[in-house]
Amino acid sequence: MRQRHSQGYASSGDDLEDDACSRQRAFLPPSPPKKTWIELLENFLWLASAAFILYFGDQHSNFIYLLCHDDRIRRLPLYLGMIGIGLNTLIFVYTTILAWSVRRFDEKWGLMKWEITSITVLPFATGFGITSFCLFTFALWPIWSFLTIPLLFTLFMACMVVIPYLIFGILGRPQNDEFRTD
């Protein structure tokens, strides 16, 4: 074992083994992977087609106005589908907050608790999503008939493009409580 305070010992930064434990580590969140221009073009096409659907609706009025005022829409399946999407959103927010609350991801029990919870709610989230898609299809079929399925899929994909950019909070905190060996 080296004596740090012995004569002739001075850390100039060249000795990385001894100097590494005395420096504070800056917390840098992981940078997202760079997207290629093809991925950016795909995202733009999903968003542009969803904007087209929302703006033009059925060529007489926009999509939001149709959902609120058109008598051709079956209301009960529409409302049940919206409840399913709301429950799905609550499940995703709950699991996200639960994942953020685990402070140290290398802790054995904290990680297992989060994994067990996310695995147990996954069938419910999938069931709510598929049921909501079917209910929306049934509710909107009188307006767009066979075009209802691609319309809903396009709106779903546009939501999947937008969701990663929504930030609900700060993912991590700086963790400088690592074990030091000096």
Image (cartoon, helix red, strand yellow):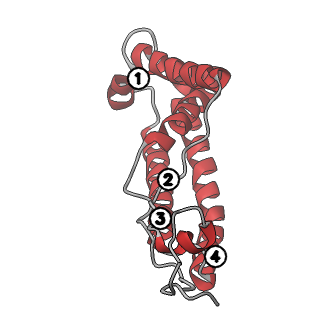
Name the residue tied to disc 4.
116
Q: Nearer the viewer, residue 121 or 75?
A: 121
Q: Is residue 102 visible?
A: no
Disc 1 to disc 2, how far (Cα)?
20 Å
Residue 101: x %, y % from top left: 44, 72
Whichever of callouts 4 and 1 sits on the residue coming sooner in the sequence is 1
Badge 2 crowding class, 10 Å Cα cut-off, few under 14, some 14 to 19, many 20 or more, is many
Which label lies toward us, 3 or 2? 3
Give the mark nearer the N terminus: 3 vs 1: 3
> In the rendering, at what x and y percent does residue 150 appear?
64, 25
Residue receiving disc 2: 84
Q: Nearer the viewer, residue 59 or 71?
A: 59
Residue 119 appears in view: yes
In which quadrant of the rendered view does residue 166 lie?
top left
Question: Identity of the amino acid at label 2?
Answer: Gly
Q: Which residue is mark 3?
A: 25
Q: Is residue 47 above or below residue 104?
A: above
Q: Seen from this angle, which residue lies furthest front? A: 8
Report how far apart the C-alphas of labels 3 and 1 lie in the structure.
Answer: 51 Å
> Disc 3 or disc 1, which is closer to the eye?
3
Residue hosting label 1: 63
Identified by mark 3, the residue type is: Arg
Q: Which mark is residue 30?
A: none
